[in-house]
Image (tube, rainbow, N blue to C red):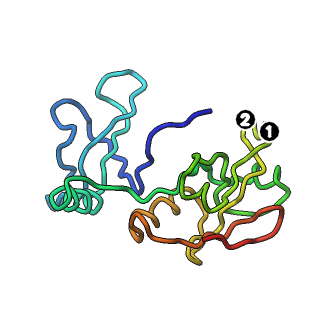
Amino acid sequence: NDITGYSISNIIQTDAAINTGNSGGPLLNTKGEMVGVNTAIFSNTGVYSGVGFAIPSNMVQKVVSSLLKNGSYEHPYMGITGITVSPEISNATHLNDTKGILVVDITADSPADKAGIRGGDVLTTVDGQDIRLGGDIIVAIDNQSVRAMEDLLSYLEEKKAVGDTIELSVIRDGKTQHID
């Protein structure tokens, strides 16, 4: 499966209607302070009701500052496709109670590929879903525990810049390894 797109860390879920009139508009709190920019909606009906999403204002500020200064913004990027390790995945990998991110795929020539991070190579059905097992399981980044994909994305976006080095703690073949 090819997965396209980019995940936004710390996205704000809102019940505000997102449509032509306010998409890109501010999301305000009860004090009138901007907390995000309305950006997308998930709707089962195709109309303007559903679950709305806003980009957090601290992320908007970071991107806008870079746009004004450099004309562009580059997201820190590893080049992995991963999923949060569920209890079912943990049992299927025989690493009971393991938390973290199962790396299912690596983008060729990406930083993760060059560092030797491994994606899954064994297609297995886990809890009714086809998942590639056998990849590294990321359990920490720079000695900070990673329990879910959102933890990794937030850390990269908030603490790192393009070109920075990170240390991943991964479980590979049942043993913990540290990879820069």
Q: Is residue 142 visible?
A: yes
Which residue is nearer to you in this view: 17 or 176?
Answer: 176
Q: Residue at x 54, y 37 (%)?
A: 3
Q: Is residue 18 above or below residue 7?
A: above
Q: Is residue 44 above or below residue 86?
A: above
Count the labels in the image: 2
Residue 44 shown left or right of residue 27 in the figure: right
Q: Decide: few, some or many residues near mark 1? Use Cα within 10 Å; few <14, some 14-19, many ≥20.
A: some
Q: Decide: few, some or many residues near mark 2? Use Cα within 10 Å; few <14, some 14-19, many ≥20.
A: few
How far apart marks 2 and 1 lie (CA) works out to 6 Å
Residue 99: x %, y % from top left: 68, 63
Q: Residue at x 74, y 54 (%)?
A: 87
The quadrant of the picture occupied by the N terminus is top right
Q: Quadrant of residue 24?
A: top left
Where residue 124 is drawn, which disc sits there? 1
Which amino acid type corresponds to the residue marked 1 in the rendered image? Thr
Which residue is nearer to you in this view: 155 or 16?
Answer: 155
Which residue is nearer to you in this view: 29 or 87?
Answer: 87
Residue 61: x %, y % from top left: 22, 61
Is label 1 in a helix, a strand or a loop?
strand
Give the labeled residue for mark 2: 130
- Residue farthest to the bottom, as pictured: 143
Residue 40 shown left or right of residue 163 in the figure: left
